[in-house]
Image (cartoon, coloured by chain):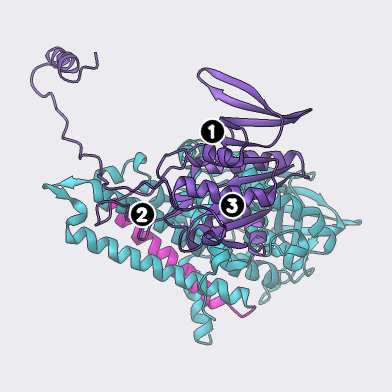
């Protein structure tokens, strides 16, 4: 089986994002970058399949600026077989739909049996690229996937739903957008890191893939941090009983949580 | 060439840092229980950490001392007890096996020290011999094809997790003026008859790191248990092994200090007194600035020694300098961290208290600060 995983490099989840001086973008100077968490789960799911079946090959692709190469190196160190970097001047500001179109070109070439994406990237939480990619490819899409198995006549896909899961069957190639699953993504192994060093990561220029990078366009016009939290209330007066009464009253009338 | 880590070395360190960070919720319980959980050792094996310094031809990664120093720093920044276990396994135990072992000895033992099923141990210290290591009294006597070992070893790191322990014993008698005479290293399986893993010590810090006594009561080992030169093992085994081990302790001290200072840094940004974050006060800022600078200086000394070792150049003095400075620095840095956290710093929950206790051992093991000064001085002035 041939699997293509699409991954995005985003600010690491431990980074405290600050609004840049222009008031409409995040200040990315000096921050740590990482593979988006759900994309890591997608890589893990693909690698688990490879663990069970060594014939499986896992390719990983990203659309992003030069720094995104680090995300690909990490994916290789985790155990992916090859990586493709779609980059160039347009890669930094490409929007979801343009990214999906570019990924479709890569998928056309690589001809995978399955494409795995994270369900959404943790920077913009749009959740668009996976379904849009399926649409551009004309392939079916299954969301919130936690597991898949090859069966006679296709692939069975475990899809998380409220209170349980459903098993869907795809008869041919499909795009799966992956949910957090029980098994956490593996750490890059040291041999993996040393092996990744020797692997070439081919670069493709986004501008020359022949995809429409323009319409329809969205732009962020304003970014605001959440309002600073006000100081709490401290009930100091009276004995425990009086304080408890006061607390209940505040929870009911002011906070309206009771 | 300057001893700065390259990209691959930094990536290895970053991967280990990430793994170490994931252990945070479990560390307190493991320290209470006084043991490193088996699955943590197994994970280090699976990641390739436990064989990282073993050459590829012997089944390891051949990653070198610089990468290893960075890895130990990361482990120690998160959890010093774990760094100690890894340091002893990879440094002195595997290192000695790789340098002096026969192909058969390597084939038999290295895989078990690499795969995460246990951690190797090295037994030198005895009740009557510490800094004066050559005064050891454990004996080895020929018996048929094999050897019989008798004696007591103390303060053996990892012994409880070890499939094999390298034991320094004397073959024949010591002679006046030739205290090293007869000293020989033996690979002793911990399940050999006559071998007892005795009492685990209760220590000031490093609670999850095992430090146990080893009793050898006529312990029988095969003729193939001799590791390195027979009767002349003190220099090539004990002294050479300690040189490398010292780089490991230096790296560990850098990590412990850095971990404590990082925690203090986070705290002073949040803790408010007199209407402002205490990190706004110059005395707090200066304390952090000094500690952070000393951490950097210690790291450079450590990486220099590691780099010399990787380059195949002499590094005895540099290893001692790194160990001496880094371990003494770690006392100051962890003390600063505890002080900056004030009352909270003295509490278990804040972790810097653990850092301070763990750091204390670094001026003592693998040669005390006094021994390091002796080694350094000897390289400067003829006796």
Nearer the observer: mark 2 or 3; the answer is 3
Instruction: Give the answer, above or below, for where B274 lies relative to B64.
Output: above
Q: Which residues are magenta?
A: B312-339
**Mark 2 Cα-neighbour bin, 10 Å: few <14, some 14–19, many ≥20:** some
Q: Secondary structure at mark 2?
A: helix
Q: Are marks 2 and 3 in contact (CB under 8 Å)?
A: no
Whether residue B111 is situated above or below residue A249 in the rendered picture? below
Give me the disc on residue B251: none
* Horizontal arrangement in the rendering, residue B283 relative to residue A37 (left or right): left
The image shows residue B299 at horizontal and vertical percentages of 45, 68
Residue A198 or A6: which is nearer the viewer?
A6
B244 inside magenta stretch: no
| Residue at 16% over, 34% down | A231
Q: What's the residue at 29%, 66% (across, down)?
A: B290
Residue at label 3?
Answer: A61
| Frontmost residue, B122 versus B103 | B103
Task: Report how far apart the C-alphas of labels 1 and 2 lie in the structure.
Answer: 33 Å
Residue identifier under label 2: B262
Q: Which residue is mark 1?
A: A179
Q: Residue furthest right?
A: B144
Answer with the quarter of the image where residue B38 lies: top right
Indicate which disc, 1 or 3, sits on the residue closer to the N terminus. Answer: 3
Q: Residue at x 65, y 61 (%)?
A: A194
Q: Is residue B131 visible?
A: no
| Chain A rendering hue | purple
Chain letter of mark 2 equals: B
Mark 2 and mark 3 on one chain: no
Chain letter, colour cyan: B
Locate residue B144: give its quadrant: bottom right
- Magenta-colored segment: predominant secondary structure: helix
């Amino acid at each position: 089986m041939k699997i293509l995983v699409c991954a995005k490099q985003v600010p690491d989840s431990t980074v405290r994002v600050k609004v840049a001086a222009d008031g409409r973008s995040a200040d990315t100077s000096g921050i740590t970058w990482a593979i988006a968490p759900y994309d890591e789960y997608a890589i893990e799911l693909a690698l688990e399949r490879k663990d069970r079946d060594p014939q499986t090959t896992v390719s990983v692709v990203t659309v992003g600026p030069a720094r995104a190469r680090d995300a690909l190196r990490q994916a290789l160190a985790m155990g992916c077989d090859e990586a493709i970097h779609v980059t160039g001047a347009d890669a930094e500001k490409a929007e979801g739909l343009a990214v999906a179109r570019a990924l479709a070109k890569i998928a056309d070439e690589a001809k995978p049996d399955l494409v795995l994406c994270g369900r959404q990237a943790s920077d913009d939480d749009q959740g668009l690229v996976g379904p849009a990619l399926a649409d551009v490819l004309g392939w079916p899409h299954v969301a919130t996937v936690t597991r898949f198995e090859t069966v006679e006549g296709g692939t069975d896909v475990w899809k998380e739903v409220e209170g349980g899961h459903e098993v869907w069957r795809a008869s041919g190639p499909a795009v799966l957008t992956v949910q957090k699953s029980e098994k956490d993504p593996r750490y890059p192994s040291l041999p993996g890191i040393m092996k990744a060093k020797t692997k070439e990561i081919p670069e493709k220029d986004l501008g020359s893939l022949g995809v429409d990078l323009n319409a329809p366009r969205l732009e962020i016009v304003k970014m605001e941090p959440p309002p600073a939290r006000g100081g709490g209330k401290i009930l100091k007066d009276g004995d425990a009983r009086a304080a408890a009464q006061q607390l209940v009253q505040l929870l009911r009338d002011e906070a309206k949580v009771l | 060439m300057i001893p700065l880590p390259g990209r691959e070395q930094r990536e290895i360190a970053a991967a280990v840092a990430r793994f170490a960070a994931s252990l945070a919720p479990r560390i307190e319980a493991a320290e209470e229980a006084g043991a490193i959980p088996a699955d943590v050792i197994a994970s280090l094996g699976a990641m390739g950490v436990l064989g990282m310094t073993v050459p590829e031809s012997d089944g390891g990664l051949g990653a070198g001392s610089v990468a290893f120093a960075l890895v130990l720093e990361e482990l120690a920044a998160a959890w010093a007890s774990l760094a100690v276990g890894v340091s002893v396994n990879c440094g002195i135990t595997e290192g000695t096996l790789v340098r002096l072992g026969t192909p058969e000895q390597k084939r038999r033992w290295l895989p078990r020290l690499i795969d995460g099923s246990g951690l190797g141990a090295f037994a030198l210290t005895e009740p009557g011999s510490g800094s004066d290591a050559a005064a050891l009294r454990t004996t080895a006597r020929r018996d048929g094809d094999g050897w019989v070992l008798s004696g007591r070893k103390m303060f053996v790191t990892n012994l409880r997790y070890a499939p094999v322990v390298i034991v320094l014993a004397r073959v024949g008698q010591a002679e006046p003026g030739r205290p090293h005479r007869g000293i020989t290293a033996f690979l002793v399986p911990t399940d050999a008859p006559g071998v007892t893993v005795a009492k685990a010590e209760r220590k000031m810090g490093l609670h999850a790191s095992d430090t146990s006594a080893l009793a050898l009561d006529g312990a029988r080992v095969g003729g193939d248990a001799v590791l390195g030169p027979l009767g002349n093992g003190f220099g090539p085994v004990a002294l050479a092994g300690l040189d490398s081990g010292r780089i490991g302790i230096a790296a560990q001290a850098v990590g412990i200090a850095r971990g404590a200072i990082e925690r203090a840094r986070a705290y002073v940004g949040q803790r408010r007194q007199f209407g402002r974050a205490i990190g706004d006060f110059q005395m707090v800022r200066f304390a952090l600035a000094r500690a952070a600078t000393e951490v950097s200086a210690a790291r450079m000394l450590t990486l220099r020694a590691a780099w010399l070792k990787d380059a195949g150049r002499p590094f005895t003095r540099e290893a001692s300098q790194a160990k001496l400075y880094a371990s003494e620095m770690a006392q100051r840095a962890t003390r600063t961290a505890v002080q900056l956290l004030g009352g909270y710093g003295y509490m278990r929950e804040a972790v810097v208290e653990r850092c301070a206790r763990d750091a204390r051992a670094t001026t003592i093991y693998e040669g005390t600060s006094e021994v390091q000064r002796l080694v350094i001085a000897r390289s400067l002035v003829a006796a």
